Image: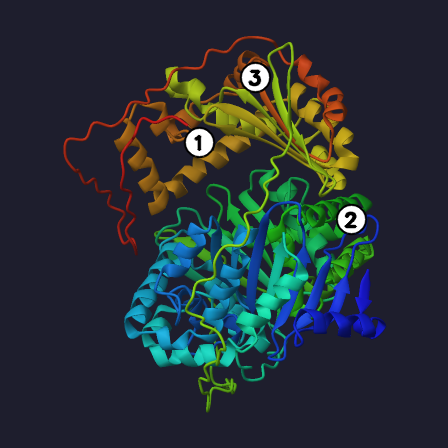
Amino acid sequence: MKQRLVVLVAFTIALATLVSGQAKLVEKVTKQGNEIVIPYEKYVLPNGLTLIIHEDHSDPVVHVDVTYHVGSAREEIGKSGFAHFFEHMMFQGSDNVADEQHFKIVSDAGGTLNGSTNRDRTNYYETVPSNQLEKMLWLEADRMGFLLDAVTQKKFEIQRSTVKNERGQNYDNRPYGLAGETASRNLYPYGHPYSWLTIGYVEDLNRGNVNDLKNFFLRWYGPNNAAVTVGGDVKPADVVKLVEKYFGVIPRGPEVKPVVVPAVALTADRYASYTDNYAKLPLLLIQYPTVPNYHKDMGALACLAQVLGQGKNSVLYQQLVKKQLALQANTFSQLSELAGEMGFQLIPGPGKSLETMDSLFRNALDSFEARGVTDDDVAKFKGGIEAQQINGLQSVSGKVSQLAAFQTFTGNPNKIADLITMYQAVTKEDVMRVYNQYLKGKHAVFLSVLPKGQEKMIAAADNYKVDSSRYDAPDYGYAGLKYTKAQDNFDRKKLPGNGANPTVKVPKFWRKDMPNGVKMIGTETSEIPTVTVTITIPGGHLLQANDTAKIGLADMFADMMNEDTKNYSAEQLAVSLQKLGSSVNISSRFNGITFSIQSLKKNLDKTLELVQERMFNPKFTEADFSRIQKQNLESFKQTKSDPSAVADLVFAKVNYGPNNIVSMSEAGTEYTIRNMKLSDVENYYKNYMTSQGAKVVVVGDVKQEEILPKLAFLNKLPNKKIDLPKVNGTASVIDKTKVYMVDIPKAAQSQFRVGYSTGLKY
């Protein structure tokens, strides 16, 4: 329920006077009944800073988020990457916080911290015990108002090198790492801020100087372009006092106006390509321009993306992956503040070119038109959205992040209410309408990513060249910027002390051992109406210690358990789960097979019925086995060219020895997977599905007496003892330092792994 200032004039004035005399309460939202809402109070300080407070005493922690409405969209040609670069500099000390002390202060307080930059915003956040709140606000205020005098050329050069290394690690030196950058450069007009990645270009990072960086801070890091959001075990009045004390004197920055860019319009399909030194399989990336975030069509576009290429029931999966024409075919809808894209990623099956994938993709869209959008499509979309929104409320950090994002991009922290209404109003007619409006007959970028030596696999010859002749550089208002340092009436150099130690309430656990050997543990929490259950059957990768010729069997078994059952196809199960807003995933771990179950409380019974179907009625078809086997074999090719993956594999073998199960990949090897048979999977199920040693963990809005009868189906598990092999866990004997090297030709970076086996168990 939203209570506006005009309705609460007397109350607001009284409260504002009580808590600060300056900070003004402009909005208060409370929860009524079972509505999905994040309660909060919103204040505005005289310098333009927005403060949002969410009170939640369920745990003695507090999450602090400071979001600045600036990302790479505020950069200009020749100075890409500055928003992200500045994020790094914000951790390098300020007037009253020494270099690298930000990390130490938060860590010593028992907290965690980080920052992130995207196209449209930069945020910094900490989660700490609630008695550390004042310290966190002191830290954040110091770098907002007292940073520039602490910025040195040395710090600048160190972070420039760090950012360049980050680009190499995450983009230049990774398979398909440059796909997004290349596609964006060809999709957006020259100079459009989305035409480059947030990380920026190396040549721009090399070109920039410390004064450029200081000007970026002065232009965009004023309190009037920021929102401080605090959530957790706090009292709003206390938070307001602290925020005004530490942030209130920071001078207002220059006015910040919304970025205005023309809509993207393509007059023809644009084909582009590049050779990837690390990819082993070609990739076709297709991107259509759509709409900005929070547009009225965002819900219908999200549903369309799901129908076309998300999950086993999607059009692309059924038309391409299921028929073994493609190893991968998926869809994403990415909406940002200024524009959006709908993208399709297609990796062809062995021997198929990207030209063939282009044709198959267009045929799949034709089949979608003939198929249309069904009631089930919309129902499963809405079920998933409902679960996603509820699960987003389970942590203080999640709620704070949502409030901060909604405030930054819409000015309405309670935007979740509007989104729920919009998503629930989506119809199948809406989905077909956005398909016709944004995809059918429309033009897109078709990017071919070609492994070295496979250039003939290209979808079509490049036909587009970026036109820079019409670029009109914007005036971002950098002229005449001056640094005005805040004047305090207290000693800001003094690190605030700790508040009173919070009282930690340890959750009450219940335990139950079933007669057949299943051990259960659970705890009840009613914060959100969801239930999470994990069921772990002993076995997994460890079982192959005595038969290494079948390394990867447990992983293959888990994949097959996620496929068809005797009564349902995998697609039918997926639809049923999505409509419930539930998930059931089976995975292999080092010493077990785990069933991971998430459900809304109201749908728990139906979800557990589907768990039983997967657990007791797997079908194990030759068609599913063959498809998964081929996919795994192709993925091994990619692993060989991934420096990080190679380093991990070699490091494990050096540490534990080549014949130790711990050093062997749980996915297996090309040899073991190629020689595996469907009968191996069937035998695993026959021999190793057992109740003895099985463990169940239950967390959520359900009582012990409610859940135990619902899990009685575990009594049907065979009651047999499985002897797991013993692992050689002795410590490494190292008489001197040794250096092992693996050559990956033309790698842009080196990967290092340093360490040894301790022999310690956990």
Residue 50 shows in the view: yes
Numbered circle sitting on residue 331: none
Kindly identify the residue that appears in the image at 33 percent across and 36 percent down: 649
Say which amino acid is labelled 2.
Val
Q: Determine the image quadrant of residue 759.
A: top left
Q: Residue 378, which numbered label?
A: 2
Residue bearing mark 1 = 667
The three-letter amino acid code for the residue at tag 3 is Tyr
- Circle nearer the N terminus (2, 1): 2
Does dot 1 land on a helix, a strand or a loop? loop
Q: Residue furthest left?
A: 736
Q: Residues within 10 Å of mark 2 (few under 14, many from 20)?
A: many
* Left or right position of 8 against 80: right
Q: CA distance from mark 2 to mark 1?
A: 35 Å
739 versus 74 height, above or below: above
Residue 290 visible, this orientation: no
Q: Are marks 3 and 1 in contact (CB under 8 Å)?
A: no
Which image quadrant is residue 39 in? bottom right
Residue linked to disc 3: 685
Q: Tag 2, which secondary structure?
A: helix
Q: Residues within 10 Å of mark 1 (few under 14, many from 20)?
A: some
Q: Position of residue 269 (x, y in %)?
A: 57, 67
Mark sitting earlier along the chain (2/3) = 2
Tell which residue pokes out farthest to the bottom in this image.
480
Task: Tell me the distance, in whole angstroms, between the alpha carbons under discs 2 and 3.
Answer: 35 Å
